[in-house]
Image (cartoon, rainbow, N blue to C red):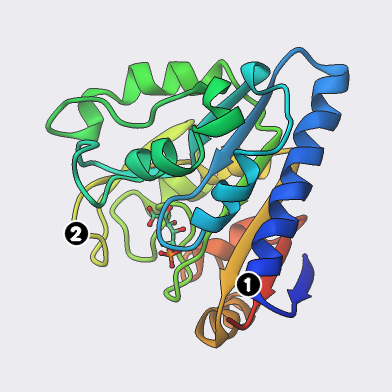
Amino acid sequence: MKLVEYPDAEMMMMDLADTIASELNNALLVDDHASLAVPGGTTPGPIFDSLCAINVAWPRVHVMLTDERWVPETSPRSNTALLRQRLLTDKAAAARYVPLYADADTPEERLGDLSQQVQACLPLTVALLGMGSDMHTASIFPGADQLDLALTGSDTLVAMRAPGAPEPRITLSANVLKEAMCRHIVIVGDEKRAALEKARHLQPHDAPVAALLPGATVHWAKE
Ligand SMILES: O=C(O)[C@H](O)[C@@H](O)[C@H](O)[C@H](O)COP(=O)(O)O
């Protein structure tokens, strides 16, 4: 794992947007298509604000979430809504969006067809991940009902229910995230930095992010 520390979060977000754009552009020099997976939650919005305005051959880029809460786009908890508002806009409005949510009561009802669409875009060119202070990443939570499947199974997508998550989730598996050509984890603040240090000494079952640390670049700013 490589750790990059930044003087402030604003600079980190802009820098990371540039890095991701370069990685996509480099991949597009040799491949027809590239794919980008990004987290939801409260951290990545400023990265999206910069990235959407950068010149990338966006019509050749597939964009998806690393994980989604099983709520409609009208919900303030929808990661899809965040993506539409802040990433799939400006120049990046031309990107091809690959959904992780469909209108159904449970993720299990749509897992098959959503997985097929994701599989067509693998391996990921770039995976950007967030992390919670409980050391979950994507929606791979400690104590989740399908934790072992998400950590060690060969499935593309896993439906999850976890004690710390108010609604069902759907997540890319660790297997898919590990195969990304470039993997970044972005965290802000002392609490998450302490969680990261703790995770480095734990097994993925207790600290799911630990499964994704080898080969990743972690980007951290205090505030
Ligand atoms: O839907 C989600 O919640 C995310 O994709 C999740 O994995 C997120 O990255 C972490 O929970 C960190 O969340 P914050 O950035 O809000 O702290």
Residue drawn where x is 32% and y is 26% of the image = 111
Q: Is residue 128 left or right of residue 2?
A: left
Q: Amino acid at mark 1?
A: Ala
Tag of residue 9: 1
Q: Quadrant of the C terminus?
A: bottom right
Comparing 220 with 13, the one in front is 13
Label 1 CB sits under 8 Å from any ligand 1 atom: no
Q: Quadrant of the N terminus?
A: bottom right
Q: Nearer the viewer, mark 2 or mark 1?
A: 1
Q: Mark 2, residues whose alpha carbon is within 10 Å: few (<14), some, or many (≥20)?
A: few
Label 2 CB sits under 8 Å from any ligand 1 atom: no
Q: Amino acid at mark 2?
A: Pro
Q: Is residue 120 left or right of residue 106?
A: right
Outermost residue toward the left? 105
Determine which quarter of the picture holds residue 59.
top right
Q: CA distance from mark 2 to mark 1?
A: 28 Å
Residue 69 higher or lower than 111, as above or below: below
Q: Is residue 37 left or right of residue 70?
A: right
Tag of residue 139: none
Q: Indicate the position of residue 217 as horizontal and vertical percent values.
A: 75, 60
Residue drawn where x is 67% and y is 17% of the image = 60
Residue 47 higher or lower than 116, as above or below: below
Q: Mark 1, residues whose alpha carbon is within 10 Å: few (<14), some, or many (≥20)?
A: many
Q: Indicate the position of residue 211 as horizontal and vertical percent values.
A: 60, 58
Element marked by disc 2: loop
Q: Indicate the position of residue 61 as horizontal and vertical percent values.
A: 64, 23
Determine which quarter of the picture holds residue 83.
top left
Residue drawn where x is 39% and y is 65% of the image = 142
Q: Which residue is mark 2?
A: 166
Determine which quarter of the picture holds residue 13.
bottom right
Q: Earlier in the sequence, mark 2 or mark 1?
A: 1
Q: Indicate the position of residue 36 as horizontal and vertical percent values.
A: 62, 35
